[in-house]
Structures are given as structure tokens and as C-alpha cells.
Amino acid sequence: MSMRPSISILVAFAIVAGLFVAARAAAADDASGPIAIKAAKIITCDATDTIVNNGVVLVSKGKIELIGKASEVKIPKGYRIIEHDGWVVPGLVDAHNHIAGSLSDLNDGVYLTNPGLRTVDVVDPRNENLENGLSGGVTSVLLIPGSGNNMSGFGTITKTFGNSTDEMLIRSPGSLKIAQAGNPERYWYGVGRTFMNWNTRNTLQKAKEYHDERTDYEQGGKKDGPAYDIVWEDFRGLFERKYPVSVHTQIYQVYMSTITMLRDHFGLDVMTDHSTFDSFKLASHIKERKMIPIVGPRQFYPDFRDRTISGCASRFREQGVEKVGFNTDAPVIPQEDLCYQATMACWFGFDDHYEAIKGLTRIPAEALGVLNEVGSIEPGKDADLGLWTGSPIDPREHCQMTIVDGKVGYDVKVRRRTR
Amino acid sequence: MLKGRSMKIAHCGRIGRRVSLMLALAVSLSVAGAADAQTILFENARIVPVSSKDIKKGSVLVKDGKIVRVAESLEAPFDAKVIDCTGKTLFPGMVDPHTWRGMDVPNESPPVTPFVNVYDAIDPSQLFFEDSLRDGVTSIHIIAANDCVIGGMSRVVHPIGMTPEEMTTAGQVALKLCISPKNGFDRMLQMATFRETFAKLDESMKSLAEKRYEDKLREEGKDLDVPPEEEQKRGRELIRDEDVDEKDRNLLWLTQGKIRAFIYCGKAMDVRPAIALAKKHGFYEQTVLVLGSECFKATDELKDARRPVVLDANLVHREKDPITGEEKETFVPRQMDRAGLKFALQRQASSSLGDRYLWYQAARCVAEGVSRDKALKSITLWPAEMLGLGERLGSIESGKDANILVLTGDPLDAQTWVEHVYVQGEHVYDREEDIRLKKLFAKPAEEAGPSTSESAPADEEKAAEGDSKPELKNADDQPRQDQPRRPGEGRRGGRRGPGGGPRPGPRGGE
């Protein structure tokens, strides 16, 4: 298939319609049909850490079909071949994003807990921040409300590219957003941790009681269960561990409350975003519970008391926490800069670059419970791929093409965004 | 296990990792896990048991975290770890009767929050706990401060552990009630809020009692038999803890005498209403009065009330005569002593002076005429009794928790240092291994030795520079500044690496 005529037409069109539209049109143009990507290196991030040199990835119907050596795989007819003299890595997964929707719908400040809200209502496929995210190889994000309340609503896991919200959706609810301290302290005349934690616990307790009674009723235990409640219904998946709570938590005491309250007391599946400051001092407790800290957007902790600087991710790792991921908190830092979070973690002592790539892909996908769909390059999974000139951790390299569900969402030849 | 929990762990790291381990000191001080069963015999020690006369040379036997025997001479059990304490003094771990420190904020904004719990705000990583351990304070009563009408549930903790659970000596201890008005309130509104709160509690208990009585009748298949007033009376004892709304429970326990009331009186005029409130709502016997320094003027009322008192950390009350300009000084503990009251001393919250230490506060009482015996009790046994923990804490006697300090000398002597701390029989502090005190005890030759400051690498300077714009989270994170800087010792551009930071004050300052 020749791309040149369509591009020249599109360039002319772009003058009229603007570059963004052009980029999307170009992507849509190539959407149909299966593709074969031949690459110098394929980092699959699968369970056995397979790396294929001089390999090929076959993609059809939006899914990965096959991965193998270029010398061994026979590319079937009808496959568009993309020759790539660089690395193919899984599409990056950001477990902490506020930009997939409209920024004005970030927080509802009336109550300290307002769990009835859902970000799925505000996902915006035409959001230009998402397009920028594509230029950094980011293909899946957890869109969560802000941290102005202790409990600010349910998040959504969505792709960064697609024609509609429905097409892009991976899972809703993606998580329940909880912020245990920090920003909510500014609420009203200021609230302290005794009040905030009491409030959060109390809300979860009510939801738990509803869930238990309702479950009992459904299983025929009690004759008259509690009346159906649309807000508490969303919580049931939390107690069934179908989706996690994503917790804005950092600083020793706050992270400690996350462990003791959410994980130990309520037995929830807990994903911690931020995980910065001196959270790493809790590594022994985190390791014991096999929790996955997702670190960012600041990768270091300057301790003014002891006059030391620590890399947050590396301190977790050196104390035996196996899985550490990275996040941006976009728009706090731009979505497309997700890979630089891992870069900075490595700069601050997280010395395993391969694990760092996993921390951008497989590990956040696992923490979000969507590893069956995204996070690695394996047959049957969504065809979300980043075609990089080299390692995503190396700031000298860049992403040349991003493929989401088998469609080209970003192509540096069509539209280059300098990061 | 024992070793794991002591400060020693800070030294077990790889060479060259010491700086980063220093940072983790707060954590290395505290390691999870229950104590291994340990039998320890301290022998040849001078013992100041507080509850009885000093023993010039004696032994203390500890088993499973408890003190088993105290005597002049004891045979060591075959499995005991024997510690020779020749020249040392054993003293009970001191008890801090009342502090909001260790939490994020002193008080919540809403005026009435009896339902919250300090558990949710205790930050084990605060320097405050580390300092407490170093200073020999092994029991700390953390409670809401005095800017509220009713504050949340308090807790007694020992300053070692990674979570509040691990640190807990006793939960569900007391509620804070303030007679002196909260910021923005006046005394009338303050008292009206009390009336309203207790009236509401009463109402909800009545309706709950009525409901419980009717539930019982229904279960038994009986018809209603008595008027509502009678139902409310009969139903009272049918109320179970789980029936009570979570927001009411702590307050209900207070009126039932199950927990204690720490009632703050900032001024002498607050003492009478405090006593009246406690009597009216049934928690008089559980009341401890927390007094401002002016309250000594209500000594007669206090004498009649015979309730124990917690005194302001500011021990001297000073007042100027508006006409003559003459200054009048009153040493408050001496007044309380004369009135025959049991009193507990506090530490000044964020002080760089001597009053940040309990032993110093007690020593000052001795200077002003309080007997040594009572001064010692005011930092150990009496506060323990006020917390309802007189059976467990505050003295070295059999049956009590083995919270024991090994001191270099008399507890009230300014040259005395805490050498070892045992909490519930576990060795949790060793001064030899206290990194923060290293500089203080370095011999002059050692200190002047090969100087790292000569060649401070660039990144270390960066670290020092970061200090000038710190993001502070709370007072504990303040860079230490209590020592005056010598000329040429400025922070910015000063040729000092992180190792050459400002020295802690006497007895390990903040």
C-alpha cells in the first residue's frame, strides 16, 4: 500500500483544516487491514520477560496475532509491512491521569466524600492532551478525578485513541479515587487527619454494610435486603476485588494509613499513585502485602532533616519491593512525558532499565487489573504498541509511531511533536 | 528480634550507605513484630523505683515484658540475659500526660468531634517520637489540643513502632473537653454547645432505649405494656454497643464512666464549670483537669474537687500589677503540692530550652521546694494513674510493664544521660548507637580529624543549598537551628557536607 499520495493530499488538507485533524485522518486512513511490524528489537514484557531481536509482530483485528523471529515468521498476504529499525515496546500505561476528560470537571467540592461521581461521564476522545500523550507512546490511562476531596468519584480506564468513548473504554469503573490527606486538608476551614480518616472509613463502612446485606439478600439469606442504592452499588466491585481503589497517598503517615485502613481493615485491592516523599520507609509492609507502588511525578525525596536525597523508586526496590510502576499525574506533568518518569527514577538509582520499562507497561496494567488486555505484547492482547528509536528510558530516543488497537494513532512522519 | 528493634540496625548497613541509613533512622528505630519472650536480669544497679524507697544496689528481673521481681539481690534464672548495671541507675520510663504532638494538627476545625480518634493522625515517623525515646519518655498520651469544645478519642503510645497499632500501650483512653473557649467562640457559646451536645445525646439514647425495649417485646410476642418514659428507662440496659451510632459512641462511654475526661481550664474561672460539667454528666470520677498557669488562683476549688491535675509546661505564673508595675511570681507546682493535689508535669511543645525535658521540669520543682519524691512521681507514677494505667506504668515494681531506663546517674541530675531504654522488656534504645548523638560525644581529636569539609563535593553543596527553601510539612521537619552559628559557618556556600550539619542541642536536640 502506498502512503505517499494520501499524505500529499492530506498536507494540502491540513492547511485548511489544521494539523490535528490531519493526523487523525491519516491514522484513520491506515486503520483497516492487518499489519506486520518488523523491528530490530521487540520488548514483549510478557511473564517470561521475552525479548525478540530482529523480530516481527503480526497484528489483525486490533489484536496481537503472533510474535516471532523475522527469519522464522512468514508474513501472510495482505499484511501491510512496517519496517522499523528500532524497538517495539508495549503501549505505555499511565495509572494516574486527569486529562482524558475536561479539566473543569475535576472535583466537586461540596462534600469531603462524593463517591456518586464517575469520570466515564466526561471522557473526551477529542482531547488534545491525549493526542500529545500518543506522541510519547502512551496508549492506556486511568482517568481519575482530582484529590480535592477524600473520595472524589470513580475513575475510568481508557485508551488514548479512538473514535468514541465507547470504543476507547477499557473498564468503568476503573477504580475508586481516594485521597487520604494532602489536598483535602484545604477543605472548609481546613480538616485534619483524624477527621478525614474517620470520614473515609465511615463512608466505606456504610458501603461495606450495604454490600454485605445486599449479597446476603441476593443469595436468599434475608428476605428483605436493603433498598437498591445506586451509589453504594458501585462500591460492590471494590469489595469483590473486581477493581481497586486508586489512592493519592504519599508521606509516611498517609501511606501507612492507606495500608492499615484500606488494605488491612477493608481488604481492598489498593493501587497507590504518587507513593513519593518518604513512603519508601514502609517498604517492609508493602513487600509483605505484595502491593505495587506507582511512583511519580516526583522521583526523588530530599530529606531536609537528615540532609539526604533518595530516589523513591530505587528505595522501594532495594528494600525488596519487586514491582514498582511510574505515573505522571498529567497535567501536572505532560502526558507524553510518562517515560521520563522512569528515566528520572533510573537517574536516582533505580538501576534496572528493563524493570523500568516494565514499570511503564506491565506493572501499572497489573496494578489496575487490566493485564489481560494491555501492558505487554502477547498474542490475543490489544495491539497497543510503541515504535521507538531505542529504549524509552533513554531521553535521546523518541517514539516514532504509536499503534492503538491495531490502528496508527501517532506517526512522526505525519505530525511530529517535540517533547 | 531484640537487636532488630534497637538502634543498632542503623549500623548494620553496607559501608558507604550510612548516610542513607541515617535518613531511615526513624524507621530503623522501629521494627515490626512482637517481642521474643525474654528474661532479663539487671543487677548491681542503683534503683529509683518511685513507688518505694531507692535501692542502693539491687536487681530487677524482667520476664515476658513485665517486671517480675525487684530486690537487693536476686539469683539469675538459667535462661536470663544478665546485665551488669554497676554505676548505673534504673528509673521507670517517664510518662507524658498530655500532648497533641505526634499528630498532623492540634485540633480539627469542627467544634464537636468526639467521634474522631487520634489513631488516624499519629505519625510514627515524626522526630518527636525518636526524641521522646532518647529523652526517656516511654509513654505518651496523645490527645486533641485545647482549641475545641469536645475533641476526639485519645491514646497512650510508646515511641517505638512503625504503625500506631505497634505503638499502642492503651487505646480508648480519654476525650478532651475545653471550658476555655475555642477560637472564635466565647464562654457562653462554649457552654451552650456543651448543653446542646449532651442534650442531643440524651435524646438519641432515649429513642434508642425505647426502640430496644419494643424490639424485645416484639421478639417475645408481647404487646406494648408501659408508657414511653418507662420504656426509655427499661430499654437503657438493652442497648448494645453496636446499636449506638458511631458518632455518639465515645460520648456515651464518657457519660457511662468507661473512659476518662481531660478537661482543659485555661483560666481560674474555668475550674468551677469544669467540675460542674463533670458532675452533671457522670464522669467526675474519671476527670483529670488540664490547667493553665493562672488556675492556681482556683486552688480552693481544686482542693475541694480533689481531682488530679496536669500542669502547664510553663511552671511559673507571672503577673504585673497594673498600678504599681510590681511583678508577682508564682511557682505553680508548689501551690498544687501545698494543696495536696496529685499533679503531672508537661513538656513544652516546641521549645529548645530545658523545659522540653520532663526530668528538667521535675528538677525545677525540687528547686522550688517540692519534695524529690513528689517531683519524681509527677513525671512517672501520677500521670500513669491519671491515665488509668497506674497498674502498668510509672514505677519499677513487680507486675508492671518493663519500661525501664538505664541512666548514667540520678534522674534529676543535669549530667545524667539515658543510656538504654527498655519498652515492655525490649531493648529499643542504645545511646552508643544513636547516630544523632555521635557528634555530641565525639572526642575533640576525633572531630578535628581528617576533615570531610575540606573537599565538600558539589552535590553535597547542592543538598545544603536545598535547605534554604525547604517544603516543610510540620514543625518536626524544621531544620535544626538551635545552636548559634559560628562566624564562617554559614549554611549557603559554607564548606560543610551533610555530615557537618548543625549539632543537636544538649540531650539530643531537634
Image: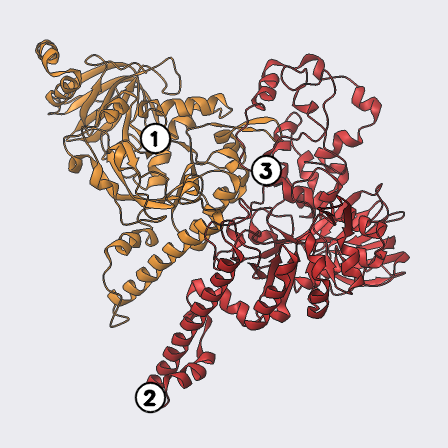
- Examine the rendering and report whether any part of residue B80 can be seen: no
Q: Position of residue A382 (x, y in %)?
A: 23, 33
- The span from disc 1 to disc 2 (Cα, nearest Å) is 67 Å
- Mark number, residue A361: 1
Q: Residues within 10 Å of mark 3 (few under 14, many from 20)?
A: some
Under mark 3, the amino acid is Ala
Out of A58 and B427, give the one closest to the viewer: B427
Q: Report whether B37 appears left or right of A201.
A: right
**Residue at 48% over, 68% down:** B198
Q: Please, is residue B441 above or below residue B216 in the view?
A: above
Q: Position of residue A37 (x, y in %)?
A: 22, 20
Colour representing chain A: orange
Out of B400 and B188, give the one closest to the viewer: B188
Chain letter for mark 3, please.
Answer: B
Q: Residues within 10 Å of mark 1 (few under 14, many from 20)?
A: many
Q: Residues within 10 Å of mark 2 (few under 14, many from 20)?
A: few
Q: Please, is residue A378 above or below residue A134 in the view?
A: below
Colour mapping used in the image = by chain
Q: In the rendered image, which residue does mark 2 sit on?
A: B224
Q: In the rendered image, which residue does mark 3 sit on?
A: B475
- The span from disc 3 to disc 2 (Cα, nearest Å) is 60 Å
Instruction: Looking at the image, tell me whether mark 3 or mark 2 is earlier in sequence order.
Output: 2
